[in-house]
Image (spheres, helix red, strand yellow):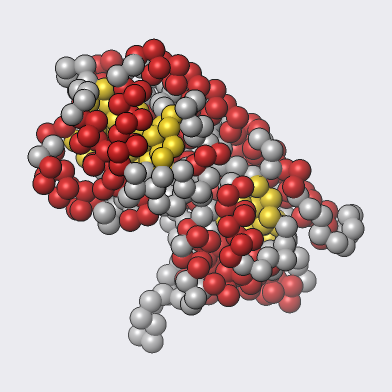
C-alpha cells in the first residue's frame, strides 16, 4: 500500500505514534509518505520506503499567520495525486481531520478517491476539542472520516460522550518498539547521576500544565525524606520555569537534574528505578509504557487510559490526580523494598510486551485494507464496525 501520514512533528504522543507506525509499516514493505511542516522528531535515520513532504509557508501582508490549513490541504492533494496514495491516515483531529475532508473534496473533483483514517490522541478530544470555538469542527471531522481510531478505551468513551459520533471508533492502542525500549544496564552512567548509590526517579514530558510537573517535585520532596534518591527531568516546555522555582523554594535543587529534550530516552530510562507521571489528563500514557518496557515501575495518576497501561499493585501504583501523599507513599513502598522493586520491574516489562509493534501494526494494516475495500465496493456499502481490532 501507498500510505500518507499527516502528523505534528513534535515529541508529543501523536507525533511519536505516527512516526513509529510509519516506520513499522515501511519495514513491512509499504510506501510511507509523511506530510508535516518539518521532519518528525523520531524520524532520525534514512529508512527505505519512507518519504517526507514538508508543508511549505506562504507570506503575504494580509495574513497575520500563515494559512496552515490551506497549505496542508494543498500538499495532501499534491502528494495523493502524484504519489497515487491508497489511503491517508491523519493523527490528531485538529485541524487534520477537517483538512483531510477538504483535500478529499478537491481530489474527488479530479476523479480520485482517497479513504481517510483519523486517529484521536487525547487533548484533541479532552482539552482543545472541547473548546466551543472548535468542538463543531472536531465533530464534523470525526464524522466525515472513513475510519476513526482512539488510542485507549477511555478515550473512545470520552469521545462518544462529548460528541455526537456517527462513525464507529476502533480502539487500537499505542505501541512501542520493544527492541529499542529494553533495559540496558549502564552502571557508569548511573553513577554520574547517583554517585552514592541513590535510587533514580524520572519524569519525561512536554512540561505542559496538563502534565502537573510541579507535582513531581512535591512527590520527590516527600520521597527524599525517607530514601536516598535523585530526580531526573527529561523534556522541556512552558511549565519548566515554575518547576524550577518550586525546587528552589523547597531547597532540593541539588538532587534534581534537568536534562532538557533528549532523543535517546531509552538510554536514560535504563538508568531509572521509578517513573512518575501525575497527569491531570492522559489518553494513554505512552511515556509510562516506554518506561515499563525498560523495566521501570510507574507511579501515576489514574487519569484517562493510564489504568489500561499501569496496573495498580502490579506494575506500579495509581492515585487520584493531585494526591501527592498517595503517590509519595507508593514510591517509598517500592524504592525501600528491593525485592518488590525487582518484582515490579519484571511485571512492568511483561505488561509492555502486550503493546509490541508486531501486535499493533497489523491492526492498522487491516483497517487500511478495509477502507480501501469499502471504497472499491468489495464490501457492503454500510460501514463495518471495527470492534474486533482493539484487543491487544
Picture residue at 51% right of the left edge, 49% below the top:
304
Residue drawn at (16%, 43%) of the image: 247
| Residue 17 position within the rendered picture, expressed as x and y whole percent measured from the top left | 53, 45
Q: Position of residue 283 (x, y in %)?
A: 51, 49
Query: Is residue 74 visible from the viewing direction of this image?
Result: no
What is the tally of numbered marks visible in this picture?
0
226 left or right of 124 in image = left
Q: Nearer the viewer, residue 89 or 154?
A: 154
Figure quadrant of residue 248: top left
Q: Residue 336 location in percent, x, y? A: 30, 19
**Taking 118 as reference, is 104 above or below it?**
below
Q: Relative to 233, is 291 on the left or the right?
A: right
Answer yes or no: is residue 255 visible.
Answer: yes
Query: Where does the image place residue 292, in percent across and percent down from the top left?
Result: 46, 29
Give the residue furthest to the bottom.
62
Q: Residue furthest top?
A: 339
Viewer-proximal residue among 374 and 158: 158
Q: Is residue 377 above or below residue 130?
A: above
Quarter of the rendering occupied by the C terminus: top right
Front-lying residue, 37 or 251: 251
Left or right: 218 with respect to 134? Answer: left
**Which residue is rendered at x = 63% and y = 72% of the image?**
140
Amino acid at each position: 500500500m501507498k500510505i500518507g501520514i499527516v502528523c505534528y512533528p513534535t515529541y508529543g504522543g501523536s507525533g511519536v505514534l505516527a512516526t513509529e507506525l510509519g516506520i513499522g509499516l515501511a519495514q513491512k514493505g509499504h510506501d510511507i509518505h509523511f506530510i508535516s511542516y518539518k521532519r518528525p522528531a523520531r524520524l532520525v535515520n534514512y529508512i527505505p520506503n519512507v518519504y517526507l513532504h514538508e508543508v511549505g509557508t506562504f507570506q503575504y501582508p494580509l495574513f497575520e499567520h500563515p494559512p496552515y490549513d490551506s497549505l496542508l490541504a494543498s500538499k495532501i492533494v499534491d502528494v495523493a495525486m502524484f504519489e497515487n496514495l491508497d489511503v491517508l491516515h491523519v493523527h490528531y483531529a485538529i485541524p487534520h481531520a477537517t483538512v483531510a475532508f477538504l483535500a478529499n473534496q478537491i481530489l474527488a473533483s479530479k476523479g480520485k478517491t482517497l479513504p481517510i483514517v483519523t486517529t484521536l490522541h487525547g487533548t484533541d478530544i479532552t482539552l482543545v476539542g472541547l473548546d466551543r470555538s472548535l468542538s463543531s469542527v472536531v465533530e464534523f471531522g470525526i464524522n466525515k472520516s472513513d475510519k476513526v481510531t482512539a488510542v485507549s478505551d477511555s478515550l473512545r468513551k470520552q469521545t462518544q460522550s462529548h460528541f455526537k459520533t456517527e462513525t464507529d471508533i476502533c480502539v487500537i492502542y499505542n505501541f512501542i518498539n520493544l527492541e529499542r525500549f529494553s533495559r540496558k544496564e549502564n552502571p557508569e552512567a548511573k553513577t554520574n547521576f547517583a554517585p552514592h548509590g541513590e535510587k533514580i526517579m524520572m519524569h519525561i514530558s512536554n512540561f505542559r500544565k496538563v502534565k502537573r510537573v510541579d507535582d513531581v517535585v512535591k512527590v520527590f520532596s516527600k520521597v527524599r525524606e525517607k530514601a536516598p534518591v535523585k530526580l531526573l527531568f527529561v523534556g522541556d516546555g512552558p511549565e519548566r520555569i515554575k518547576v524550577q522555582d518550586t525546587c528552589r523554594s523547597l531547597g532540593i535543587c541539588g538532587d534534581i537534574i534537568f536534562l532538557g529534550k533528549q532523543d535517546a530516552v531509552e538510554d536514560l530510562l535504563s538508568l531509572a528505578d521509578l517513573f512518575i507521571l501525575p497527569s491531570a489528563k492522559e489518553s494513554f500514557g505512552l511515556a509510562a509504557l516506554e518506561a515499563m518496557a525498560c523495566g521501570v515501575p510507574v507511579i501515576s495518576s489514574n487519569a484517562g487510559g493510564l489504568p489500561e497501561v499501569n496496573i495498580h499493585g502490579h506494575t506500579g501504583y495509581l492515585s487520584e490526580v493531585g494526591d501527592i501523599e498517595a503517590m509519595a507513599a507508593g514510591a517509598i513502598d517500592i524504592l525501600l523494598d528491593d525485592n518488590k522493586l525487582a518484582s515490579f520491574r519484571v511485571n512492568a516489562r511483561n505488561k509492555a510486551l502486550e503493546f509490541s509493534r508486531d501486535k499493533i501494526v497489523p491492526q492498522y494494516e487491516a483497517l487500511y485494507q478495509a477502507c480501501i475495500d469499502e471504497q472499491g465496493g468489495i464490501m457492503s456499502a454500510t460501514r463495518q464496525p471495527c470492534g474486533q481490532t482493539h484487543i491487544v
